[in-house]
Amino acid sequence: MPTTDRLFGYQHAFDHPVTLWLTVSIAAVLALSLPLIALLFRTGKIDEKLRDELVARCVSWMIIVPAIIVPLLLGAAWMILFIGLLSLLCYREFARATGQFRHREVSLIVVIGILAITFATLDHWYGFFAALPPLTIALLVSASILRDDPKGYIQRVALGIFAFLLFGVCLGHLGYFANDSHYRPMLFLILACVQLNDVFAFICGKLLGKHKLCPGTSPNKTIEGSLGAIILTTTLVTALGFSVFAGTKMATLPHLVGLGLIISITGQLGDLTLSSIKRDLSIKDMGHSIPGHGGLLDRCNSLLLVAPAAFHYIGFFIGIGLEDAKRIITGT
């Protein structure tokens, strides 16, 4: 696919059938969600409090889903810029929750690092993309020395590095998928299965859960819910993966099962990572920007570890964007 078509070719949005199927399926689920909640309330299956909570969540999803799907369908450039903006907003929530925003030089470097990651991704310059984590870490360590304030040095530098790696580098891998001509079905697969992984864990936990998984970190999560999500998500990834990766080395049962396990397990670990952060800070949510969900980080936490793990797993077998033009901005 020509670079211009990949970056801005909205007319190619539904070239792959998986992209079309998932778009239609997601739209149908959203359209039916509110009538279903109303039916459950009228038949006495749920009480008023739960109905209001579910309605708030559904309305939020009706905003979240288009915000993700529209850039994905419009073209790779819009998706990369969307991920860059998402990374900045996630860091903003984290900086406010931890008080890191008070350390302006650290926050400035983290923001510059995220912007540089976004530029390297948009340029399809993997060498620069891979060099940015150690370079940014070195800059964070050095800039904090020049402040000449040793008290709290370890904490502010460590928080800056932690935030940059999670929200810049890890989420940046999600954006780098867009440098592949077939990025739409791959990202649709990852995004849909990560969100359904949370749903599967919740449902299996409610129906079968008896043993707590990490009660000190997330009291509502159970071992049964986790295992149920692993089985169901792996099955879903495998079923969709044969179509998404048709004609490649990834389209084999062992490789797709491996991808399903990675998405489910790292998705749950990402969720637990944010739960650990919130427990440490003694807060319920990282923000209040999304009614019924908390902040952006509360909704995107499962993607934090999935993005780099899935990127390098898929890249090991078939590569990401190997046949597409490199350094499209800085190259000759």
Image: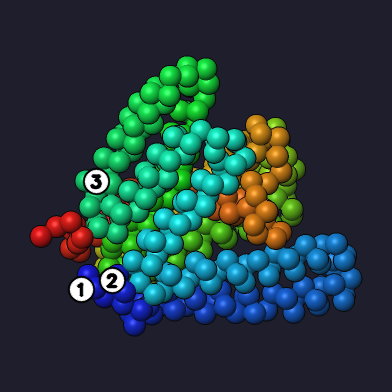
Q: Quadrant of residue 148?
A: top left
Q: Quick one: which residue is furthest to the bottom in this view?
A: 11
Q: Which residue is mark 1?
A: 2
Structural distance between the alpha carbons of marks 1 and 3: 22 Å
Q: Residue at x 28, y 52 (%)?
A: 120
Q: Dot 3, crowdedness within 10 Å: few (<14), some or many (≥20)?
A: some
The dot on residue 6 is 2
* Figure check: 182 above or below 256: below
Closer to the N terminus: mark 1 or mark 3? 1
- SS category of the residue bearing label 1: loop
- SS category of the residue bearing label 3: helix
Q: Residue at x 74, y 53 (%)?
A: 206
* Figure check: 308 above or below 135: below
What amino acid type should be assigned to the residue bearing mark 2?
Arg
Coordinates of residue 8 in the picture (x, y in percent): 31, 74
Q: Quick one: which residue is furthest to the top in this view?
A: 150
What amino acid type should be assigned to the residue bearing mark 1?
Pro
Out of 194 and 117, give the one closest to the viewer: 117
The dot on residue 18 is none
Closer to the N terminus: mark 3 or mark 2? 2
**How many numbered discs?**
3
In the picture, measured across the screen, residue 47 lies left or right of residue 81, that is: right
Q: Dot 1, crowdedness within 10 Å: few (<14), some or many (≥20)?
A: few
Out of 81 and 214, give the one closest to the viewer: 81
Structural distance between the alpha carbons of marks 2 and 1: 6 Å
Coordinates of residue 207 in the picture (x, y in percent): 74, 54
Task: Work out which quarter of the rendered image holds the N terminus and state it.
Answer: bottom left
Out of 172 and 145, give the one closest to the viewer: 145
The dot on residue 128 is 3
